[in-house]
Image (cartoon, rainbow, N blue to C red):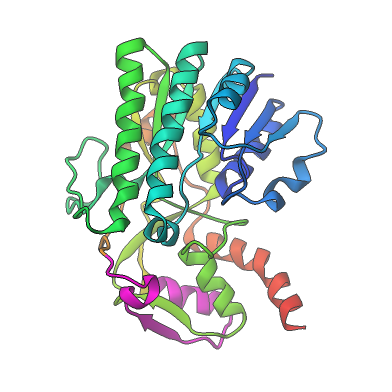
Amino acid sequence: MAKMLITGGAGFIGSHLAERLLADLHHVTVLDDLSTGRADNIRHLLEHPNFQLVRDSVENETTVNTLVSATDAVFHLASAVGVKLVADEPVRTIRTTIHGTEVVLESAFRFSRPVLITSSSEVYGKGTRVPFSEDDDVVMGATRFNRWCYAYSKGIDEFLGLAYHRQFGLPVRIVRLFNTVGPRQVGMYGMVLPRFVEAALTDRPLQVYGDGRQTRCFCHVADVVDALVKLMAHPSAVGQVFNLGSDEEISMNDLAQRVIDLANSKSTIEHVPYEQAYGKEFDDMPRRVPRLDKIRAAIAFRPTNDLNAIVRSVLDELRPLARRNNA
């Protein structure tokens, strides 16, 4: 029974991770300022004897030092969330992402605590060598596009984490998350699957940004959380970077149609220009597919949920809400 700290633990992924660690009989402390995390995500955990919520920013050094000193390991998930938030609030994105990670790493170094940092597939930028491998060179978009500030920031996170490992021997693991989806994810920050499902359940048009030919790969949050727990426990993962996600590729047009079919919806597909969706010029990646050889070799990673199962899990969660709203 260990003491685990999750920064950003009231978020979509963090709340599922908290559940998993509690099920594994660990003590769990969540640090979250609830700016994008939601109290509802962890409300059912508040009465658990081994769970604690600390509502504060990951940038507060005093709070972070207090919590890290009392923990055995840190899962650092706190960051900006969603393409829309990144596009609308670049200052917040850069500051929270980079400074938050700096505070966590310095505290982990001070108290000699292992850290797992969740990075993002965004760090591959506009790379065209698909599928993306952990040691690939990257090509970033122009700095005039707010959209890329998250990618640059997450890249700095990785450099910081690896620097603390190489220079000071801090046990750091870095995980590049690709599109993670499932129950509790919300569409308000531009997350595509809950947006599609919410529209399909009310027979509204599914808005596909751009021409819809851009492709992504979706992995269920339960599979992602399982891998995070295993990587934190795996000694050979220290000092390494891992892709984590699914390699089942699908275009946004096909995803929209899949959601319509599985929901038995009367919805249609409506294409919306990026400029209209985000209110500004937008630069996107045409494909985002991970190479998973490294994580498969390390922890025998195999997602257990295919895309149909993933879509159905989101439909099952959101259907009662749609019914109540239409009553």
Q: Where residue 296 appears, x then y in whole percent?
A: 38, 35
> Which residue does the image show at 51% across and 79% down from the upper left?
260
29 sits to left or right of 115: right
Q: Quadrant of residue 318?
A: bottom right
Q: Where residue 157 appears, x then y in whole percent?
A: 35, 34
Locate the N terminus by quadrant: top right
Residue 244 sits above or below residue 274 on the image: above
Q: Where residue 110 appears, x then y in whole percent?
A: 48, 12
Q: Where residue 72 appears, x then y in whole percent?
A: 59, 17
Residue 280 sits above or below residue 293 on the image: below
215 sits to left or right of 4: left
The one nearer the camera, 61 or 238, is 61
Locate the C terminus by quadrant: bottom right
> Which residue does the image show at 49% across and 61% down from the upper left?
189
> Which residue does the image show at 60% across and 28% down from the upper left?
5
The one nearer the camera, 248 or 59, is 59
Residue 23, can we see it? no
What is the total number of numbered labels drawn onto the structure image? 0
Q: Quadrant of residue 323?
A: bottom right
Indicate yes or no whether the magenta region holds residue 20.
no
103 sits to left or right of 2: left
179 sits to left or right of 33: left
Indicate yes or no whether the magenta region holds residue 271.
yes
Q: Which residues are magenta?
A: 254-282
Residue 218, can we see it? yes
> Which residue does the image show at 18% across and 55% down from the upper left?
142
